[in-house]
Amino acid sequence: MAATHSQGDKTPRTERGRKTLRKLLDAAATEFAEKGFHEASISGITRSAGVALGTFYTYFDSKDAVFRALVSDMSAGVGKAAREALDPSMGALEIERVALRAFLEFAAEHKEIYRIIDEAEFVDPDSYRAHYETIGSRIEERLKLGGESGEFAPGLGTPEAWAVMGMNVFLGLRYVIWGREGDPDFEEIARRANMLLTRGIAS
Protein backbone atom coordinates (compact mmCIF):
# COMPACT_ATOMS: atom_id res chain seq x y z
CA MET A 1 0.00 0.00 0.00
CA ALA A 2 1.14 3.51 -0.66
CA ALA A 3 2.11 5.46 2.44
CA THR A 4 -0.44 8.16 3.12
CA HIS A 5 0.61 9.17 6.62
CA SER A 6 0.13 12.83 7.49
CA GLN A 7 1.22 14.34 10.79
CA GLY A 8 2.22 17.83 9.86
CA ASP A 9 5.99 18.23 9.94
CA LYS A 10 6.43 14.49 10.59
CA THR A 11 5.59 13.69 6.98
CA PRO A 12 8.76 12.22 5.42
CA ARG A 13 10.41 14.35 2.75
CA THR A 14 13.01 11.87 1.48
CA GLU A 15 12.78 8.51 -0.25
CA ARG A 16 14.57 6.91 2.69
CA GLY A 17 12.05 8.43 5.08
CA ARG A 18 9.14 7.20 2.98
CA LYS A 19 10.59 3.69 2.93
CA THR A 20 10.99 3.73 6.73
CA LEU A 21 7.42 4.92 7.12
CA ARG A 22 6.27 2.12 4.84
CA LYS A 23 8.13 -0.42 7.00
CA LEU A 24 6.48 0.94 10.14
CA LEU A 25 2.99 0.87 8.65
CA ASP A 26 3.45 -2.67 7.31
CA ALA A 27 4.80 -3.82 10.68
CA ALA A 28 1.92 -2.09 12.46
CA ALA A 29 -0.56 -3.90 10.21
CA THR A 30 0.91 -7.24 11.23
CA GLU A 31 1.14 -6.32 14.91
CA PHE A 32 -2.43 -5.04 15.18
CA ALA A 33 -3.86 -7.87 13.09
CA GLU A 34 -2.16 -10.58 15.16
CA LYS A 35 -2.56 -9.09 18.64
CA GLY A 36 -5.33 -6.53 18.45
CA PHE A 37 -4.90 -2.89 19.37
CA HIS A 38 -4.70 -3.29 23.14
CA GLU A 39 -2.15 -6.10 23.14
CA ALA A 40 -0.05 -4.63 20.34
CA SER A 41 3.01 -2.60 21.32
CA ILE A 42 5.24 0.02 19.80
CA SER A 43 8.27 -2.13 20.59
CA GLY A 44 6.66 -5.02 18.70
CA ILE A 45 6.11 -2.76 15.71
CA THR A 46 9.69 -1.49 15.70
CA ARG A 47 11.14 -5.00 16.08
CA SER A 48 9.09 -6.21 13.15
CA ALA A 49 10.04 -3.16 11.08
CA GLY A 50 13.71 -3.55 11.98
CA VAL A 51 14.08 0.04 13.18
CA ALA A 52 15.10 1.64 16.46
CA LEU A 53 12.44 2.64 18.97
CA GLY A 54 13.46 6.28 18.64
CA THR A 55 12.81 6.09 14.90
CA PHE A 56 9.16 5.34 15.58
CA TYR A 57 8.74 8.70 17.31
CA THR A 58 10.20 10.45 14.30
CA TYR A 59 7.00 9.50 12.51
CA PHE A 60 4.34 8.91 15.18
CA ASP A 61 3.55 10.32 18.60
CA SER A 62 1.86 7.20 19.99
CA LYS A 63 0.32 3.81 19.31
CA ASP A 64 -2.99 5.57 18.69
CA ALA A 65 -1.34 7.76 16.05
CA VAL A 66 0.13 4.86 14.10
CA PHE A 67 -3.21 3.06 14.27
CA ARG A 68 -5.01 6.09 12.83
CA ALA A 69 -2.39 6.39 10.10
CA LEU A 70 -2.74 2.69 9.32
CA VAL A 71 -6.53 2.93 8.91
CA SER A 72 -6.06 5.91 6.59
CA ASP A 73 -3.36 4.04 4.67
CA MET A 74 -5.58 0.99 4.20
CA SER A 75 -8.49 3.13 3.06
CA ALA A 76 -6.21 4.79 0.51
CA GLY A 77 -4.97 1.38 -0.57
CA VAL A 78 -8.51 0.23 -1.35
CA GLY A 79 -9.06 3.30 -3.50
CA LYS A 80 -5.71 2.94 -5.26
CA ALA A 81 -6.41 -0.71 -6.11
CA ALA A 82 -9.70 0.25 -7.74
CA ARG A 83 -8.24 3.20 -9.65
CA GLU A 84 -5.40 1.12 -11.05
CA ALA A 85 -7.82 -1.54 -12.27
CA LEU A 86 -10.15 0.87 -14.05
CA ASP A 87 -9.88 2.28 -17.54
CA PRO A 88 -11.56 5.44 -18.86
CA SER A 89 -13.10 3.43 -21.70
CA MET A 90 -15.12 1.22 -19.32
CA GLY A 91 -18.84 1.62 -18.99
CA ALA A 92 -20.50 2.15 -15.61
CA LEU A 93 -21.46 -1.48 -15.04
CA GLU A 94 -18.05 -2.76 -16.05
CA ILE A 95 -16.47 -0.27 -13.65
CA GLU A 96 -18.46 -1.72 -10.74
CA ARG A 97 -17.50 -5.28 -11.71
CA VAL A 98 -13.82 -4.46 -12.04
CA ALA A 99 -13.78 -2.35 -8.87
CA LEU A 100 -15.26 -5.23 -6.87
CA ARG A 101 -12.76 -7.70 -8.27
CA ALA A 102 -9.94 -5.28 -7.44
CA PHE A 103 -11.22 -4.95 -3.88
CA LEU A 104 -11.38 -8.72 -3.44
CA GLU A 105 -7.83 -9.05 -4.75
CA PHE A 106 -6.64 -6.28 -2.46
CA ALA A 107 -8.34 -7.88 0.55
CA ALA A 108 -6.78 -11.24 -0.31
CA GLU A 109 -3.33 -9.61 -0.19
CA HIS A 110 -4.16 -7.65 2.97
CA LYS A 111 -6.51 -9.85 4.97
CA GLU A 112 -5.62 -7.89 8.09
CA ILE A 113 -7.76 -5.03 6.80
CA TYR A 114 -10.94 -6.65 8.13
CA ARG A 115 -9.73 -7.01 11.71
CA ILE A 116 -8.10 -3.59 11.79
CA ILE A 117 -11.04 -1.71 10.30
CA ASP A 118 -13.48 -3.54 12.58
CA GLU A 119 -11.37 -2.68 15.61
CA ALA A 120 -11.22 0.95 14.53
CA GLU A 121 -14.94 1.21 15.34
CA PHE A 122 -13.97 1.10 19.03
CA VAL A 123 -10.37 2.32 19.02
CA ASP A 124 -10.83 5.33 16.75
CA PRO A 125 -14.47 5.84 15.65
CA ASP A 126 -13.58 8.89 13.57
CA SER A 127 -11.16 6.88 11.41
CA TYR A 128 -13.67 4.05 11.15
CA ARG A 129 -16.38 6.39 9.94
CA ALA A 130 -14.03 8.23 7.59
CA HIS A 131 -12.97 4.93 6.00
CA TYR A 132 -16.51 3.97 5.04
CA GLU A 133 -17.64 7.48 4.18
CA THR A 134 -14.69 7.86 1.81
CA ILE A 135 -15.42 4.60 0.02
CA GLY A 136 -19.14 5.35 -0.03
CA SER A 137 -18.45 8.74 -1.63
CA ARG A 138 -16.31 7.12 -4.34
CA ILE A 139 -19.08 4.68 -5.21
CA GLU A 140 -21.73 7.40 -5.10
CA GLU A 141 -19.75 9.47 -7.59
CA ARG A 142 -19.48 6.46 -9.91
CA LEU A 143 -23.23 5.84 -9.69
CA LYS A 144 -23.98 9.46 -10.49
CA LEU A 145 -21.69 9.35 -13.51
CA GLY A 146 -23.42 6.16 -14.62
CA GLY A 147 -26.75 7.92 -14.31
CA GLU A 148 -25.50 10.83 -16.39
CA SER A 149 -24.30 8.46 -19.11
CA GLY A 150 -27.67 6.70 -19.19
CA GLU A 151 -26.30 3.30 -18.14
CA PHE A 152 -27.70 3.60 -14.60
CA ALA A 153 -31.05 4.96 -13.50
CA PRO A 154 -30.99 8.69 -12.80
CA GLY A 155 -31.04 9.97 -9.24
CA LEU A 156 -28.92 7.28 -7.59
CA GLY A 157 -27.23 8.56 -4.47
CA THR A 158 -26.06 7.72 -0.97
CA PRO A 159 -28.47 4.85 -0.12
CA GLU A 160 -27.63 2.98 -3.31
CA ALA A 161 -23.90 3.65 -2.90
CA TRP A 162 -23.90 2.28 0.63
CA ALA A 163 -25.92 -0.75 -0.48
CA VAL A 164 -23.27 -1.51 -3.12
CA MET A 165 -20.49 -0.95 -0.59
CA GLY A 166 -22.18 -3.26 1.91
CA MET A 167 -22.46 -5.98 -0.71
CA ASN A 168 -18.78 -5.61 -1.61
CA VAL A 169 -17.61 -5.67 2.01
CA PHE A 170 -19.56 -8.80 2.87
CA LEU A 171 -18.55 -10.58 -0.32
CA GLY A 172 -14.98 -9.96 0.80
CA LEU A 173 -15.75 -11.35 4.24
CA ARG A 174 -17.33 -14.50 2.84
CA TYR A 175 -14.97 -15.25 -0.04
CA VAL A 176 -11.67 -13.80 1.18
CA ILE A 177 -11.68 -14.09 4.96
CA TRP A 178 -13.93 -17.17 5.17
CA GLY A 179 -13.00 -18.62 1.78
CA ARG A 180 -13.55 -22.32 1.24
CA GLU A 181 -12.28 -24.87 -1.22
CA GLY A 182 -14.46 -24.89 -4.30
CA ASP A 183 -15.53 -21.24 -4.02
CA PRO A 184 -15.89 -19.36 -7.31
CA ASP A 185 -12.93 -17.18 -8.25
CA PHE A 186 -12.99 -13.43 -7.77
CA GLU A 187 -13.88 -12.76 -11.40
CA GLU A 188 -16.95 -14.99 -11.13
CA ILE A 189 -18.00 -13.42 -7.84
CA ALA A 190 -17.70 -9.96 -9.38
CA ARG A 191 -19.61 -11.08 -12.47
CA ARG A 192 -22.51 -12.43 -10.44
CA ALA A 193 -22.65 -9.36 -8.23
CA ASN A 194 -22.64 -7.25 -11.39
CA MET A 195 -25.53 -9.28 -12.75
CA LEU A 196 -27.45 -8.44 -9.58
CA LEU A 197 -26.86 -4.75 -10.28
CA THR A 198 -27.89 -5.23 -13.89
CA ARG A 199 -31.04 -7.31 -13.47
CA GLY A 200 -32.01 -7.11 -9.82
CA ILE A 201 -33.55 -10.14 -8.10
CA ALA A 202 -37.25 -9.72 -8.90
CA SER A 203 -38.71 -12.46 -11.10
Image (spheres, grey):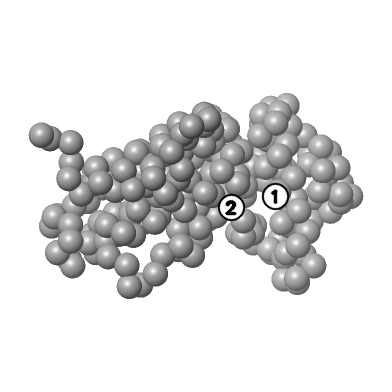
Could you classify mark 2 by the number of other residues whose Cα lies within 10 Å: few (under 14), some (14-19), or many (20 or more)? many
Residue at the spot 53% in from the left edge and 30% down from the top edge: 181
Q: Amino acid at mark 2?
A: Asp
In the image as oriented, which residue stretches furthest toward the front? 182
Residue at the spot 34% in from the left edge and 38% down from the top edge: 167
Q: Which of pointers 2 and 1 lies earlier in the amino acid sequence?
A: 1
In the image as oriented, which residue stretches furthest toward the right? 52
Q: Which mark is residue 25?
A: 1
Spot occupied by residue 35 in the image (x, y as percentages of width and height)? 71, 28
Spot occupied by residue 203 in the image (x, y as percentages of width and height)? 10, 34
Task: Give how far apart the Cα atoms at labels 2 and 1 are.
Answer: 8 Å
Spot occupied by residue 6 in the image (x, y as percentages of width and height)? 62, 59
Most foreground residue, 17 or 168: 168
Q: Is residue 201 left or right of residue 24?
A: left
Q: Which mark is residue 9?
A: none
Exactly how many numbered labels are in the figure? 2
Mark 1: which secondary structure? helix
Query: Does residue 70 show up?
Result: yes
Q: Amino acid at mark 1?
A: Leu
Spot occupied by residue 4 in the image (x, y as percentages of width and height)? 60, 59
In the rendered view, tell whether residue 125 sits above or below residue 106: above
Could you classify mark 1 by the number of other residues whose Cα lies within 10 Å: few (under 14), some (14-19), or many (20 or more)? many
Rendered-image quadrant of the N terminus? bottom right
Disc 2 and disc 1 in contact, CB within 8 angstroms: yes
Which residue was labeled with disc 2?
Answer: 73
Q: Is residue 129 left or right of residue 56?
A: left
Mark 2: which secondary structure? helix
Q: Is residue 42 left or right of residue 197?
A: right
Residue at the spot 28% in from the left edge and 40% down from the top edge: 163
